[in-house]
Image: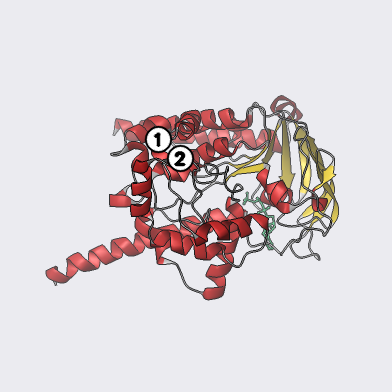
Amino acid sequence: ILQLYGPLNLFGTSYRSLQKNFIDMEKMLDLFQEPVEIQDQPEAKPLVMTGGEVVFENVSFGYNPMYPNLKSVSFKIPQGKKLALVGPSGGGKSTILRLLFRFYDPTQGRILIDGQDIRTVSQSSLRRKIGIVPQDTALFNESIGYNIGYGKIGQDRTQIFDPTRSASTLHRRRISSGSSDNNTNLGGAGIGEGARRPSLSGKSAKSAARGRKRRNSVNASLASHVRGTEGDEDADVEGEDADYDDDEDWEDDGRIQAAAEAARIHEIITRFPEAYATRVGERGMRLSGGEKQRVAIARTILKNPPILLLDEATSALDTQTEREIQNSIEAISKDRTTLMIAHRLSTIVDADEILVIQKGEIAEQGSHEQLMQAGGIYAAMWMQQLREDRTLVGSSHSSQKE
Ligand code: ATP
């Protein structure tokens, strides 16, 4: 029995880690659920960005048209300003983000970016201008440098690959085939946010050798996820995948390190065994939730989009990590039009405007000071969170005494 216990235990551990990755992936896909297919209009033009102003004009929407999940929602985010969405679970916050990314079209009303109805522009041009930092970021079983750079570096040869789009493709395949992909969940990394490796146009001999070595079944599997999807960037991707002559020097790319510094993750990476060349998921190399979110922030810094969608992590973070993430969110949202779902109210005190979304409607609207003064839902949420924080501090003190 003892002899059996070892392998069984090992199996249990692997199974649990595999299970956790599926849960991670589900969480990530949660915000950007499988959408109804949205098509470009035949005369769709590229989105022309002049500043990044976002306007919701009497937007109503229901996943089931009989039951509206958003009811005549109107707001404006001026260029470079930050709007925070707060409110009870199921109120419609994520739905607002999904509509702006055009996973669905409103049943009534319009969404405008710099005066253009997003239904009239091509989806690829829209999504190139929008960066997303999801709550939970899935990573490739690749080097940390690669994980930061994949969405952007190599753009010289290909267009930016849209992470959420491939996630939805992956999701669709997973559902339709009913099977999981072994390669997507190696060693605790998990993928799902992207489906190809981009390439650098300039190669070095060193990276070429390393690149060839690394060209493994993960890539083939990732490539297969992309095929069969429509859209111009996907067509590009397929061409790229056909010849794997891409090599990378993720670890030595100064842009990646600069982005990691801005996202406050560089220090942590330098402590990894091989710094930027450390493979995520190898020998138990796992990133914490907070670290993964900072990887997503670094990626988005590289993508440099004028519009940013942020879904703050709900998971409990220690104070230091929270501060680090807060700093990196500040770094990334500065001068970008930002729409952020906030769970910790302390992170949005400085937002230009806060909307309390409840039952698909804007229940309250204003700055932190205005809403506190109004003494309504927001003020009550704030007091509630203060009480919870005090309880937490209290319990950690008492456990320290013990
Ligand atoms: P949370 O804070 O829990 O993430 P939320 O405010 O972001 O909540 P949404 O995810 O926008 O809320 O959901 C709004 C409503 O729409 C909820 O009642 C939810 O159950 C429903 N809903 C979300 N996605 C779908 C879907 N794909 N099909 C049908 N109903 C959906």
Image position of 17 (left or right of 52): left
- How far apart are the two marked residues, 1 and 2, measured between alpha carbons? 24 Å
Image position of 75 (left or right of 204): right
Identify whether 168 is placed above or below 101: below
Q: Quadrant of residue 14?
A: bottom left
User: Where in the figure is residue 18, as x and y percent of width and height?
Assistant: 38, 62
Please give the label number shown on residue 290: 2
Image position of 62 (left or right of 341): right
Does any portion of residue 289 appear in the rendered image? no
**What's the residue at 43%, 40% (across, down)?**
291
Ligand 1 shows up in the quarter that is bottom right
Q: Is mark 1 within 8 Å of ligand 1?
A: no
User: Where in the figure is residue 129, as x and y percent of width and height?
Assistant: 68, 42
**What's the residue at 34%, 48% (across, down)?**
209
Please give the label number shown on residue 321: none
Is disc 1 in contact with disc 2, using a CB cutoff of under 8 Å?
no
Looking at the rendered image, the quarter that the N terminus falls into is bottom left
